[in-house]
Amino acid sequence: MAEQDYILKVNDLKTYFKVGKKTVRAVNGVTFDVKRGKTLCIVGESGCGKSVSAHSVMQLLPVNGKIVDGSVELMTKDPETGEMRTIRLDQLPRSGKEMRQIRGKEIAMIFQDPMSSLNPVYTVGSQIMENLRNHEKISRKEGREKIIKLLAELGIPNPEIRYDQYPHEFSGGMKQRIMIAIAMICNPTMLIADEPTTALDVTIQAQILDLIRKMQREHGTSVILITHNMGIVAEIADEVAVMYMGRVVEFGTLKQIFTNPLHPYTKALMRSVPVLGMKKDEELATIEGSTPDASTVFNGCEFADRCEFATPECSKRFPVDTVMEDGHRVRCLLFEEGHPNAES
Amino acid sequence: MNRKQGRSSLTKRSLDKFFKNRMAVVGAIFVILFVGACIFAPLITPYDPTRLVPPDRELPPSAEHWLGTDRVGRDIFARILYGGRMSILIGVSSAIGATALGTIFGCIAGFFGGKVDRVLVTIQEFVSIFPSTLLIMLIVPFVGRSVPMMIFIFIITSWGAPMRIIRGRILSLKEEPFIESCRANGISGMSIMFHHMMPNTLGPVIVNASLNVAGFILSEAGLSYIGLGVPETVPTWGNIINAAKRLDIIQNTPMLWVAPGVAIGVFVLAINFFGDGLRDALDPTTR
């Protein structure tokens, strides 16, 4: 029964890029899962592999990127028998028909930059319609009604008029609503939002997050939200995966991550976020050093050089995932069994 | 009412901009006048451009023959109108053909990239360095002079420019988020290429095509003048001037070469102004 509660399971996913003669290990053994109707936030700094993980799930990698290992499993309902079945997304041909049917229908995606995510030469209505009619057999008239209803649900004023307008007549926040409409029109089981609010100002950010949450509640969609903003995580996440250098270093529920961060990187991240009620002259903590180059080859923990708790052993061998009693998962030597600090 | 406004505002803005450009509007008016006059030639002039009336030969301009007659008594005004039909037809169909060919190859080259791109660009370079005039000179002795042959050669020698424009646009469009968004929605490659990318490239290509019309009309006139173009039985602007190779005609019947010369000059200029205006109106960077 517990199996059924998962929509997506990503297991030890490795996505490498070939850049010239170098191999960049953008995603290097990522494991996470998404529960039905829940929100998973993937956090991490720029270049840590958050977006590549999401794009690997959708098989939307550039030509030089390749999934070399691991598995991506999606649970879907068989359209004929209605039974639940598992699809190995990583084994489907990249631009084959099956993959195309999953994109937009089972898993939809919204992107960071709403300003250029819509085709400027078509009306927004026709772009939503294209996705709808691509995946569902529905007449134009019925489709139009359905779309206008969804636009109204998304808080777009005068949806009948807006339907026939072009993207340049919309503001950034409105465009992101249209992107949500395109993503949600086929009622996908999962929505991947790749930094959906980064390009918007703060008030609009809150509205867009509210909308994503509303859509999720009403349609039972699972959401993967990629962000580097801890505030957004606190607001929307059920579960959090913290990524660093192509690996998930810590995975747990929102409460676990925020009240009891285990990994030194997560701890450092938490300290670097400004909180209301801070003293005027209090300085925010920073993480020493900078993110290593993505093509660096490591012999041990990737964070060891910047870690305040690092021991000599840290740079000598790779830590393995340690699962705490409550399901909280951390990838750090300090918590591995047999380590002197393990009980802390 | 409101809906109509919403739908057309982009078009409206481009139109407004076009109408503000006076030269472009004048150009457009002349193009329309010429095309209209050529299409409705039988309503404007009662004369047959190919009928020989020897008694009326080399008449000066008069109320009956507005531009006079030529050496075999054909009305020059009628010949220019009917000749315009053929000249404009050659110009327009060659431009459409070259643009269509260039658009297809440009889309494929830009979209697939890699080897396909390299092969197509090499072919394009090879074709573009080959002058069409020379090719026509080489082919005419074997296949004879004909209008379709000429259009065909114009097309196969000049699809390079539109192809390069389209290819460049597609290469930059490939990186646009909305194309990635299309992929994320499961839209097929073919549909992305022709339905989503191509319409975004058409602005500059339409301009290029309109300027090409002028170029082809000039080429046709040049080739016909040296006797390699359209058969002499078909009147075109170039063919009419062809008669002006003789010294006595240049001296005695100036209308025979001045009139088609002016027609070519004015029409080509008008198209160029029209094309320039179109470019400014469609160019999003100057908005």
Image: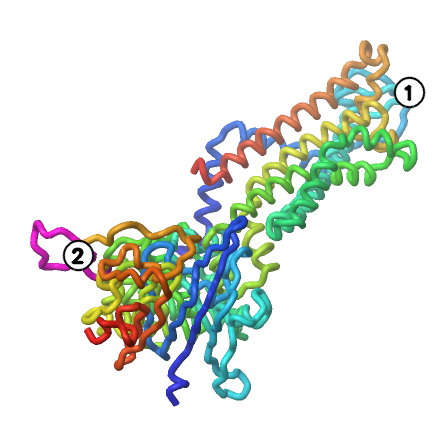
Q: Is residue A34 visible?
A: yes
Tell us which disc is closer to us: 2 or 1: 2
Quarter of the picture holding the C terminus of chain B: top left
Q: Residue at x 27, y 53 (%)?
A: A201
- Given residues B111 and A210, the one toward you in this image is B111
Q: Position of residue A177 (x, y in %)?
A: 36, 62
Give residue B158's position: percent from left, percent from top.
Answer: 71, 37
State the residue in front, A224 or B66.
A224
Q: Residues within 10 Å of mark 2 (few under 14, many from 20)?
A: some
Give the magenta part as a residue range. Answer: A269-284
Q: Which residue is mark 1?
A: B55
Residue A188 part of the magenta segment: no
User: Which amino acid type corresponds to the residue marked 1 in the rendered image?
Assistant: Pro
The amino acid on which the numbered mark 2 sits, given as a three-letter code, is Pro
- Residue matched to label 2: A274
Under circle 1, the secondary element is helix
Splitting the image into 4 quarters, where does residue A234 fall? bottom left
